[in-house]
Amino acid sequence: MTAILDRAVCPAPIRPLAPVVGADTTVPTTAGGETVYANLDYAASAPALVSVAERLSGALTEYASVHRGAGHLSQVTTARYEQARETVRRFVGGRSDDTVVFTRNTTDAVNLAAHVTPGDVVVLDIEHHANLLPWTRTGRARVVPAARTVEETVGRLEAELAAAPAALLAITGASNVTGEVLPIGRLAAAAHRHGARILVDAAQLVPHRAVSIASWGIDYLVFSGHKLYAPFGAGVLVGRGDWLDAAEPYLAGGGATADVDLDGGVAWHTGAARHEAGSPNTLGVVALAAAAQALQDIGFEEIGYHEHRLQQRLDEGLALLPGVHPLRVFDDAADRVGIAGFTVENHSPRSVAEYLSVTRGIGVRDGKFCAHPLLRKLGYPDGAVRASFGLGTSSDDVDRLLAALSDLVRR
Ligand SMILES: Cc1ncc(COP(=O)(O)O)c(C=O)c1O
């Protein structure tokens, strides 16, 4: 293992960029005793930032019903909930007239988008199921196979958009399996050239990169709080209001209606309220907005630099391990967020993840990552292993993973 670290490009220690809750949690291992848990599963759910947890505990003491009460705490809670829309809109560089609809998570937000989209949708075959199944089940999805290069993939998408009118191109910002980032500005321009809009599944992008809806030309953007260092699982859809206002409400119920007259009919609200019937996940939304603000305060240059150094260390180390194969969709992706999918020859993904957990206290994800078509396309229909990281990750976490994998492959 020392050899691996000696040859690593970036051997200096890398400290966590921001404190996260539970960073000193210890877990039992087969070596005996307890060890500090190495959380390398941020892409599934990131740990809460300490600053988010503090904001939440403040909000909890003043928590009451949203949009329903004249009481002081209801007013405070409602103001926080509504303020969160503005914080989120600024976080993703939204236009001033964009609608910000809070949802349960990214999956819910894409389903909402599918509910309001008035036509065909072009998607790639590398998507997380959340940005695939809501479209395919409408019967209006046109699935384009990704090519070996980003360049050729952009060309294929543009050809499909040109071949027949489509309402929308729905595409991931960053792959949840490989971390590869797609050129969203170029894809937005391509969609618009052919009269389509673009929706970006930014679940894996917004925790790592600054995003600008307005300057990249994005029409709709969706993501989840729990991947953005915010617990309580709220999600969001930000984007143009016209399709949202023209569609039937996503959920029927209280809060979505201006007036209900059993003889005269129902007058539905326009705007976000139209699609947010029922009592919302207020604390989830407060947490999501607090996390968005915290990331902006830290700054994406710092975040990108931190993750780049960890990524380099991990990639260099994995490349030295015999039988370890990194997953890539593209040969020419210009950027990757803090996600590394890989396989280990002669070891099932589950056995690798279990070994890392029980012998070293390291948490990674194994399986097909809700992206079965992509795993099949990459030649690993039985799945792979994924290490993912972020603000609370140190080089020690990465080195522990490399040392454990080194021992595993040499056994
Ligand atoms: C790229 C991508 N899109 C969508 C989702 C779904 O997110 P959620 O489970 O929060 O709905 C995930 C979750 O892993 C994801 O990685």
Image: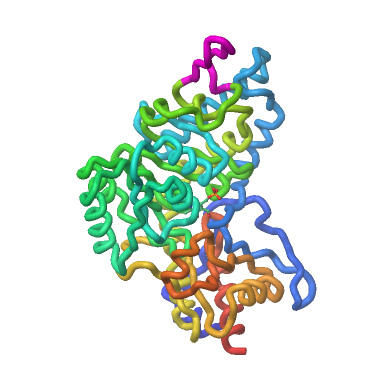
Tell me the colour scheme of the image: rainbow
Q: Where residue 156 sits: x, y (%)?
A: 25, 59
- Please report the bounds of the magenta region as a residue range: 255-269
> For the point 58% across and 63% down, which residue is it?
40
For the C terminus, the image quarter is bottom right
> For the point 28% across and 42% down, which residue is it?
196
Closer to the camera in the image, 359 or 5 = 359
Q: Where residue 91 sits: x, y (%)?
A: 43, 38
One can see residue 8 in this view: yes
Judge whether residue 259 is colored magenta: yes
Please indicate whether residue 213 sits to the left or right of residue 83 in the image. Answer: left
Q: Is 268 placed above or below 149 here?
A: above
Q: Residue furthest bottom?
A: 411
One can see residue 206 in this view: no
Q: Overall secondary structure of the magenta stretch?
A: strand
Q: Is 296 placed above or below 151 here?
A: above
Please indicate whether residue 77 sits to the left or right of residue 117 in the image. Answer: right
Judge whether residue 382 is colored magenta: no
Q: Is 313 placed above or below 165 here?
A: below
> For the point 36% across and 56% down, which residue is it?
143
Q: Quadrant of residue 319?
A: bottom left
Closer to the camera in the image, 398 or 11 = 398
Q: Where residue 13 sits: x, y (%)?
A: 52, 68
> For the point 39% across and 61% down, which residue is it?
180
